Image (spheres, helix red, strand yellow):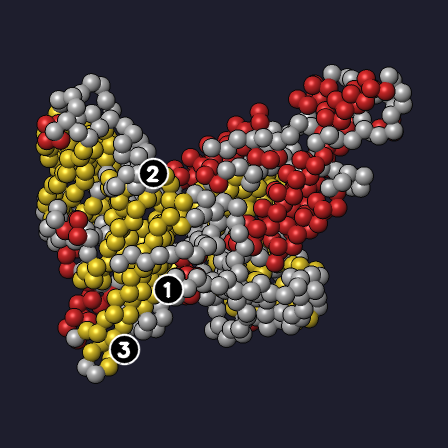
Amino acid sequence: MKSSISRTLLALSLLAMAVARPTAQQAPAPPEGPQPGVTFRLEVNYVEVDAAVYDRQGRFVGDLHRSDFQVLEDGVAQDINTFSLVNIPIERAERPLYASHPIQPDIATNARPFEGRVYVLALDDLHTTPFRTVQVRAAARQFVETRMAANDIAAVVHIGGSTDAGQEFTSDKRLLLESIDRFMGRKLRSTTLERLDEYQRQQSISGGAPISRVGDPLDLQRGYNARTSLDSLASLSEWVGSIRGRRKAIIYLSEGIDYNIYDFQNREATTIQEAMRKAIATATRSNVSIYAIDPRGLTTMGEESIEAAGGFPNDPMLNLSNQSFQDELRLAQQSLRSLAEDTGGYAAVNSNDFSKAWDRVVADNSSYYVLGYYPKNDKRDGRFRKIQVKVGRPGVEVRSRKGYTAPRGKPPAPTRQPETDKTSPELRQALDSPLPISGVTLRAFAAPFKGTAPNASIAVGVEAQGKDLAFEQKDGKFINDLELSVIAIDTSGKIKDGDRSVVNMGLKPETRERIVDTGIRMQTRLDLPPGRYQVRVAARESGAGHIGSVNYDLEVPDFSKEPLAMSGIVIASASGAQVMTAKADEELRTVLPAPATAMRQFSPNDTLAIFAEIYDNEAQTAHQVDITTTVLTDEGKTAFSTREERSSSELQGKKGGYGHTAQIPLKDLSPGLYVLKVEGKSRLGNQPAVAREVPFRVQ
């Protein structure tokens, strides 16, 4: 039975709420030598520092051990509790060569531990002039298209915009680019131009009498926008700071904070200075580097100065002249430099070529050592702590951040779990993670079908690898409880539906061996209205407390909107039927010869059975619909094809769907990568076809 999950998800929700962290516990020292892999350390007073070490020729030195390093905090040597080498390759995505567009897998898996870079693209619409919207989009798209590798993960945040515009962490470039294309700058008009208008207004009122000061009529709104951007950077840093064992990069595309914080006659100067300090302090404490990119490139604010048309007052005491535009530019760019340099990042200003900046981002986040320690000075006094990293090898250069700002006040209290939520704390933490966790290997699919309006019915299947389950032998049986939670988060960060299941296993030896060999499967349904979601799946086994999680990007169509629409595709196979099903989807059981599987690698002697639905919304007019299932090679050649013809008379003049099934023998397919394509085409008028594509491999 579906359980209620009514907690507040501490997810990015594209404004990045902070993660509450439990009290620290001392961690044992790791063994000597580089320890690869990513970990999640959530203690309050745990400090991580990245150190990149180079020889005299500028080459990265990758053979150091923990004993080669010394970390000093305010001159006091610290005990290095965790140590790892991060040396991330640039991986290229495998795509069918014939495809004019990338074909993303229809499953999510954590079979391979995450070993990529972590990026957040923070697009500051509050500090981007509307006519420079295209430049921000072009710069962000350039980074995603040319610098993001297949093993990287990124999120897109619109600082002051709608949460619907952003994108949760994903490796799907299409989703990232779509979010970037939703960006729209809405920066306020230049301070100088607003002050000029105010000067003219005062002149008209005073009849030409001397004016002692001309303020910015948009001062309050400009100050609010500045605080919003800086507070958002702080929240983002704190949230991604929960990811340990990896350097995190915030790529901040902005024209900079357009507020003079050095003129204390401006009402918001002090609060913005404090917000700037907080943003930098949070980033350094969270081991987050900010890369500030000014989309204006090489500029003199010529567009703004043209609008002034030389109408400046003669009184130099008003500080209102052509130089005012240059002062604006200098202050805005200085804010970008401060955010970048004080967090160990890089600022790209006064340059029309962003390639150098993108290369720097990738290089900084690819090769380094991660040193973690619990500071001997654990006072929460809010003071800056200087960090110095030394290496006991002559002739090398060490690059690391200068320090961090200690937290202030009492640690945040842990979030209380609602009584109606029976999910274990460990699983809740896994669901909060933006990155997959690989303690229990999982495969998952989520296929949308037409449901009860206004919702669609999402078929979700999860398969856990049996060898990751640590059974306890008791009274001749093998005991283990497998807890599984599935939640769907919308673009505002709210949980729209979820399901929790617990499989209590007391198995005979032969059944346990089968599960270890083939795994275990659980299926469920979610009810979701049309929209974009991230489905988060997490599993925990009780034997050794192993935990695994995957995140699945899901788009739920409005099946009633277009003349012809199509569901997701579910696949069953003979080999997939060997996986023991603890909880089955009863609706799919009636249309498939075996439970739907999340496997996408099959042997040549296997046979696939597929099911999809084509929804016809113009059945009142008699017509035919052709449904074709095709298997294409990576060169675009047809390896298999079958076609059926359906008549609108089946629907008796009402909107409805055609269930489509097909059997695909693999015995004649050579080992390699293939694409399964199901397409529906109406013969009524000149309507576009609907189709879905699923990549799979024959071993």
Q: Position of residue 626 (x, y in %)?
A: 14, 28
Q: Is label 2 in contact with label 3 (beta carbons under 8 Å)?
A: no
In this view, the residue farthest toward the bottom is: 475
In this view, the residue farthest toward the right is: 210
Amino acid type, residue under disc 2 in the picture? Pro
Q: Nearer the viewer, mark 3 or mark 1?
A: 1
Marks 1 and 2, how far apart at CA: 28 Å
Q: Looking at the image, is mark 2 or mark 3 earlier in the sequence? A: 3
Q: Secondary structure at mark 2?
A: loop
Figure check: 327 above or below 442: above
Residue 173: give its label.
none
Amino acid type, residue under disc 1 in the picture? Lys
Q: Position of residue 356 (x, y in %)?
A: 56, 39
Marks 2 and 3, how far apart at CA: 44 Å
Viewer-side residue, 399 vs 497 = 497
How many badges with numbers are in the image? 3
The residue sitting at 48% across, 47% down in the picture is 13
The residue sitting at 41% across, 61% down in the picture is 428
User: How many neighbours does mark 2 have within 10 angstroms: few (below 14), some (14-19), or many (20 or more)?
Assistant: some
Disc 1: which residue: 422
Disc 3: which residue: 472
Disc 2: which residue: 530
Amino acid type, residue under disc 3 in the picture? Glu
Quarter residue 610 falls in: top left
Q: Is residue 188 left or right of residue 596?
A: right
The residue sitting at 45% across, 47% down in the picture is 493
